[in-house]
Structure formats: structure tokens, C-alpha cells
Image (tube, rainbow, N blue to C red):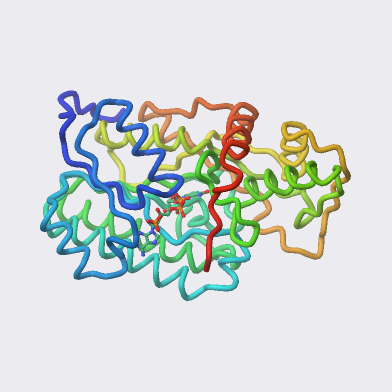
């Protein structure tokens, strides 16, 4: 069990790096709903986290007591494949600057967010935290994964050497409001939602999906992740690395059928098996986090319905990432 921090002060100063992103904005909403009043965030245009001096100046001026790192360069297979250097280097710059400034400025608690792609491509399933660095990574996103592994290890080293409360949370695939729906750089679930929606609006034309449809994936609503992050902030977790997921997966074909039904598309689905599938299966073992006292609450069908509703309300302004 984790050690509950019973006297959590609601005006503790919390910096959420990446607060305008899908994850950061969900964490902000969750903290606000729990009555935290002293939240700070900066857009990348105001504070470029790749710039070490700017990050150090920001910490010295603002003196955050807690830092949640939800800032990163993120993207799907295509983007990772086309921009390996940016995915490796920019992520390392962002996290190194945030972590080291937190260490130098005596930040009390640091939460680092990574992703399930840190685990080996062919690791036994479900993925346990202890499988980290036991075999080769999935080549399509190894650039991103290596940066994230370095972040996990930096937090672990600070924890070990200085006994500080730096912890890493590894979420499975996320979806929800403020996701990236740009077809060139988005993840599988938002990409499918958009494709099915556009095909439905276009007289139910057939849609083409990548790969064979057989890989198995797990999906977590971003509000559930935000809940886990706030749990990790309010409780002192005993170890350095925790998986965050639902512990349940489904095939990409099953996901497509679910989304097709929710959107109401009645056309054909064509699977382009000449395109890569990625890792055959990726399911998180979430027992460590469950033992600590947290579990996911939002079911996949309910979560996708809510996300589709959000997409429809924001269809003209959804994120279009430019690389
Ligand atoms: N999405 C997923 O499925 C998923 C799954 C597992 C883990 N995660 C993890 O969750 C974290 C956040 O992901 P997300 O999906 O929320 O991404 P996102 O929506 O793209 O948001 C990323 C945020 O990072 C900020 N950022 C990027 N580069 C920056 C820079 N150079 N300087 C300052 N800020 C910068 C952006 O700020 P601006 O908006 O101001 O430009 C943006 O708000 C990442 O660590 C990711 O690995 C995501």
C-alpha cells in the first residue's frame, strides 16, 4: 500500500508541464476539481522546455513545489519513423531540463510520464515493470522509447541517490478529449474515429485501415490517467515505476467494429496488410498500481462515446499537428 499524504495543502504550488496537451489539460481539470488553487503552466511559445537556461530561470522565479511532466513530443508510427532525431533529442532535452531543475530547486515531488513503448517488443504479456531493459525495443518507436527510458532512469537515480520523491508512471495507449485527430501524426483510436466519421459523412464510403487488424491493444481514457497522476501526487508511492492502464485489451479489428458502431458508419472496412502492424500485443500488468490502491474506472465503450461527442463538438478546431 502507498502512504497517504493526509494533510495535502490545497494551495501547494503545482507546475504542470504540457498543461495544454491532452494529458496535461486532463490533469489540470482533475486537480482543479479537487480544489487545488495554485496550478501553473506555460505554453511552449512562452517557455520552450528544450532551452535549459529558460527552464532554470522559470523554476527560480516560480519555485514550484510539485512538478508533473506531461510535456513531450508525441506521435504515431508514421511521425516516429519520419522524425527519429526529434523524437529522441527533443524528448531528452525537455525531460532532462525539467528533472534536473526540479532536483536543483528542491522540488518536493516530481511525476514523470512515459509510455508503454518503453518495454521490449516481444516481452511476455501482460507487461510488468520488471521487464524494462530485458530485450530489444519495437523499432518503429525506439527513438521515443529510449528518451523515455532515460527519463525513468533519471528519476530512479535521484530517488536512489538523494531519497527524493520522484516517480515515473507509464500509461498505456490513451484517448479522450483534446486528442490529436490529425491523420498524419495521430494514434490509432483518434485516427479511426476521424476516418469513420468522415466516411459516414461521405455517404458511408469504404475506409482503409493500416495493418492486419490482429494486434491487441489496451486503451485508457485520459481522465482515468489524470486520476492516477493525482493519486500518485496525493499518496507516497513506494517504488519508482508504475504501469497505468485498465489491464484489458482487444484486437484492432474489435476496436474498429466498436468505433464503427458508435459513429454509425455502415460502409466496408478494407485492411491494408502491406502497412506495418507494430508490436503484436501490448497489455499492461497494472497489479502494482492496484496494490497501491488505484484502478481505472471508465469503460472503453463509454469512453469512446464521450470522446466522439467531444470530437463532434470540436470538429472544426481539433488539433492538427504540424511537424
Ligand atoms: N497520448 C497518448 O496516447 C499517450 C500514451 C502514453 C503516454 N503518453 C504520455 O503523456 C505525455 C503527454 O502526452 P499528450 O498526449 O498529452 O501530448 P500532447 O497533447 O501532444 O501534449 C504535449 C504537450 O507538450 C508540450 N510541449 C511539447 N514540446 C514542448 C516544448 N519544446 N516546450 C514546451 N512544451 C512543449 C506541448 O505544449 P504546447 O501545447 O504549449 O505546444 C503540449 O501541451 C507524454 O509524456 C506522453 O509520452 C501519452
Residue 231 appears left or right of 265? left
Left-right relation of 20 to 284: left
Q: Name which quarter of the figure residue 23 lies in.
A: top left
Given the current orientation, which residue lies at the most extreme front position? 316
Residue closest to the eye, 135 or 142: 142
Q: Position of residue 271 (x, y in %)?
A: 83, 54
Q: Where is the N terminus found, in terms of image quarters?
A: top left
Residue 312: image x %, image y %?
A: 63, 37
Q: How many marks?
A: 0
What's the residue at 31%, 52% (across, down)? 17
Please indicate whether residue 62 sits to the left or right of residue 218 in the image. left
Pick whichever, 118 or 66, lies toward us.
66
Residue 117 in the image, given as x and y percentages of width and height: 52, 56
Q: Where is ligand 1, by quadrant? A: bottom left
Answer with left or right where residue 57 lies relative to residue 83. left
Vertical position of residue 67 compared to residue 147: above or below: above
> At 33% from the left edge and 27% from the top edge, which residue is drawn?
33
211 is higher (above) or lower (below) than 284: below
Q: Residue placed at 48% from the left, 36% from the top?
A: 286
Provide residue 18's location: percent of width, then percent of height. Answer: 36, 52
Amino acid at each position: 500500500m502507498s502512504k497517504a499524504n493526509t494533510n495535502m495543502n490545497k494551495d501547494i504550488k503545482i507546475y504542470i508541464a504540457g498543461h495544454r496537451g491532452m494529458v496535461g489539460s486532463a490533469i489540470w481539470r482533475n486537480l482543479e476539481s479537487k480544489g487545488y488553487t495554485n496550478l501553473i503552466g506555460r505554453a511552449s511559445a512562452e517557455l520552450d522546455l528544450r532551452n535549459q537556461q529558460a527552464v532554470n530561470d522559470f523554476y527560480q522565479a516560480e519555485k514550484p513545489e510539485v512538478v508533473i511532466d506531461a510535456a513531450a513530443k508525441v506521435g504515431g508510427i508514421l511521425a516516429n519513423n519520419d522524425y527519429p532525431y526529434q523524437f529522441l533529442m527533443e524528448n531528452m532535452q525537455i525531460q532532462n531540463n525539467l528533472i534536473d531543475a526540479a532536483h536543483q530547486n528542491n522540488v518536493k515531488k516530481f511525476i514523470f510520464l512515459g509510455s508503454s513503448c518503453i518495454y521490449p517488443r516481444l516481452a511476455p504479456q501482460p507487461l510488468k515493470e520488471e521487464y524494462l531493459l530485458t530485450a530489444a525495443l519495437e523499432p518503429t518507436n525506439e527513438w521515443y522509447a529510449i528518451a523515455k527510458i532515460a527519463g525513468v532512469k533519471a528519476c530512479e537515480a535521484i530517488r536512489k541517490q538523494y531519497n527524493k520523491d520522484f516517480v515515473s508512471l507509464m500509461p498505456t495507449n490513451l484517448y479522450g478529449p483534446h486528442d490529436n485527430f490529425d491523420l498524419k501524426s495521430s494514434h490509432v483510436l483518434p485516427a479511426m474515429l476521424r476516418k469513420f466519421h468522415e466516411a459516414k459523412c461521405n455517404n458511408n464510403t469504404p475506409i482503409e485501415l493500416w495493418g492486419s487488424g490482429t494486434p491487441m491493444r489496451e486503451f485508457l481514457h485520459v481522465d482515468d490517467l489524470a486520476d492516477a497522476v493525482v493519486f500518485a501526487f496525493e499518496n507516497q508511492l513506494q517504488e519508482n515505476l508504475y504501469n497505468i492502464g485498465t489491464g484489458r485489451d482487444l484486437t484492432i479489428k474489435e476496436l474498429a467494429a466498436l468505433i464503427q458502431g458508435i459513429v454509425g458508419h455502415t460502409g466496408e472496412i478494407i485492411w491494408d496488410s502491406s502497412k506495418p502492424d507494430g508490436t503484436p500485443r501490448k497489455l499492461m500488468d497494472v497489479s502494482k498500481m492496484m496494490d497501491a490502491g488505484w484502478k481505472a474506472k471508465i469503460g472503453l465503450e463509454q469512453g469512446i462515446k464521450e470522446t466522439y461527442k467531444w470530437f463532434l463538438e470540436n470538429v472544426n478546431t481539433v488539433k492538427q499537428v504540424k511537424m
